[in-house]
Amino acid sequence: KRHSATIKAKTPCVVWYVSREDMPQVPAGLKSRKTKLGSSVVQKESSSTVQVWDCIREAAEGRRKMLEKLQARLRNMKTFRKFRSEVLSLICENLHIRTFLPDQTIFTAGDSADCVYIVLKGKAEATAPNGTTNP
């Protein structure tokens, strides 16, 4: 498939996008699973090793919180309201974020339509090849 319009940023835009290649296949009949992160403690660790593991834990916690916020933002969007939590989680884990300046093209009509774009912040305008626009 190809994009049928060109999208340009009208104000500074923050855009989430996820490519078809990045998304894992969602298994049919996806069931809710709860996982619990186990923690293991190795005795006699050096203080630098402990610091590294603390840093890794903090980063993992920060990423988890960010993914929860992204999922909540998607759930508030009309398009994604009926998606199951597991599907939203898969989308959030594979999102990329990019910023576009005013008049910068996000994508062009005729480009391969292999990504889903979500304007998180800002305004963008669609222009069809026949010249009609849709803000």
Image (cartoon, rainbow, N blue to C red):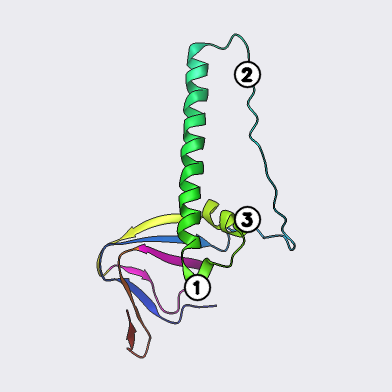
Which segment did they paint magenta?
Answer: 104-120
Point 52% across, 24% down: residue = 53
Which one is closest to the eye, mark 3 or mark 1?
3
Between residue 110 and residue 106, name the one nearer to us.
106
Q: Nearer the viewer, residue 112 or 117?
A: 117
Q: Is residue 43 left or right of residue 67?
A: right
Q: Quadrant of the C terminus?
A: bottom left
Disc 2 marks a residue whose amino acid type is Val
Please state which of the two labelled residues, at mark 1 or mark 2, is closer to the viewer. Answer: 2
**Circle 3/circle 1 CB separation < 8 Å:** no
Please tell me in which quadrant of the rendered image residue 96 appears: bottom left
Q: What residue do we see at 50% from left, 30% from top?
A: 56
Q: Is residue 6 left or right of residue 28?
A: left
Q: Specify the quadrant of the image occupied by residue 118.
A: bottom left
- In the image, residue 10 lies in the stretch drawn in magenta: no
Residue visible at 51% across and 36% down in the picture: 60
| Residue linked to disc 1 | 112
Q: Residue at x 63, y 34 (%)?
A: 37
Point out the tag, 3 or 1, that comes first from the N-terminus. Answer: 3
The quarter of the rendered structure image containing the N terminus is bottom right
Secondary element type, mark 3? helix
Residue type of the residue flagged with mark 3: Glu
